Amino acid sequence: MSLEAKALDEGVDGGRRHFLLVATTVTGLAGAAFTAVPFLSSWKPSARAQALGAPVEVDITKLEPGAIVKVEWRGQAIYIVRRTPEMLATLSTVESQLLDPASEGSEQPDYAKNDARAVKPEYLVVVGVCTHLGCAPINRFEPADAELGADWPGGFYCPCHGSRFDLSGRVFKDVPAPKNLRIPPYQFVADTRILIGSDSGAA
């Protein structure tokens, strides 16, 4: 083999070696990336874990007095209501009309076992599921509602079977629902941020 042919052959081999080195490196890095992505993703709670009860944090900065915001936790609706002083004033006036005014037979954390059924009276956090057959009550906050009557103080109404609840989610007498709306575990992690599904330090 001539010197020219030998030099050309070595150049080709060198080019091949360089190509193989680059290709191997790229393949290795891609494999490492594909391995790392599922590993890092496993650090975050899965959708299934969230559905089974991972806490949900809600920013209520823009929630106006008298308004409601609805979020989802454990596959169920959570209603957060910012109650006005007028709304809070109705709570003591309807007790004689309620089935369980002291919430003795209803479900709520100990820190929410009061008239307001809340950590902070201004904010009601309640599971938006009727205790009769699991329908979704709607908010009817205005008193003397045309459909619900002149004596309606404001609260929640389940149109499916007619159950009624006051502005603390307490059930009225003589309706199908047997219990007050449920209060989930929650805590304020800041003045305007609520963590639903965790009540550590809420009391």
Image (tube, rainbow, N blue to C red):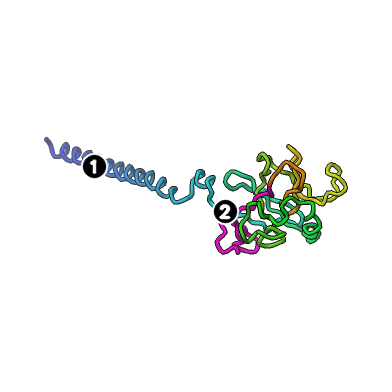
Tag 1, which secondary structure? helix
Which residue reaches farthest right?
150
19 left or right, relative to 4? right
Indicate which label's residue lies in the foreground, 1 or 2.
2
Q: Can you identify the residue that label 1 sits on?
A: 17
Q: 121 above or below 136?
A: below
Question: Disc number at residue 143?
Answer: none
Residue 76 picture location, percent across and down: 61, 44
Judged from the image, the secondary structure of the residue bearing numbered disc 2 is loop
Q: Quadrant of residue 57?
A: bottom right
Left or right, 8 with reference to 144:
left
The residue drawn where x is 77% and y is 50% is: 155
Disc 1 + disc 2, Cβ < 8 Å: no
Quickly name the residue at label 2.
197
Q: Quadrant of the N terminus?
A: top left
Residue 195 sits inside the magenta stretch: yes
Where are the magenta residues, as a range?
179-203
Residue 157 lies, in percent from the top left, at 76, 44
User: On the picture, is 54 further left or further right than 84?
Assistant: left
Extreme-left residue of the structure: 1
Residue 56 counted in the magenta span: no
Gap between marks 1 and 2, in whole Å? 58 Å
Quick one: label 1, few (<14), some, or many (20+) residues within 10 Å?
few
Task: Tell me where residue 86 sits by quadrant.
Answer: bottom right
Position of residue 17 in the picture relative to residue 66 (left or right):
left
Residues 151 and 13: in front is: 151
Q: Earlier along the polypeptide chain: callout 1 or callout 2?
A: 1
Screen quadrant of the C terminus: bottom right
Measuring from the top left, give residue 84's x and y in whole percent. Answer: 77, 59
Task: Give 192 or 92, whichever is nearer the viewer.
Answer: 92
- Residue, x 21% and y 39% (percent of image)? 13
Three-letter residue code for mark 1: Arg
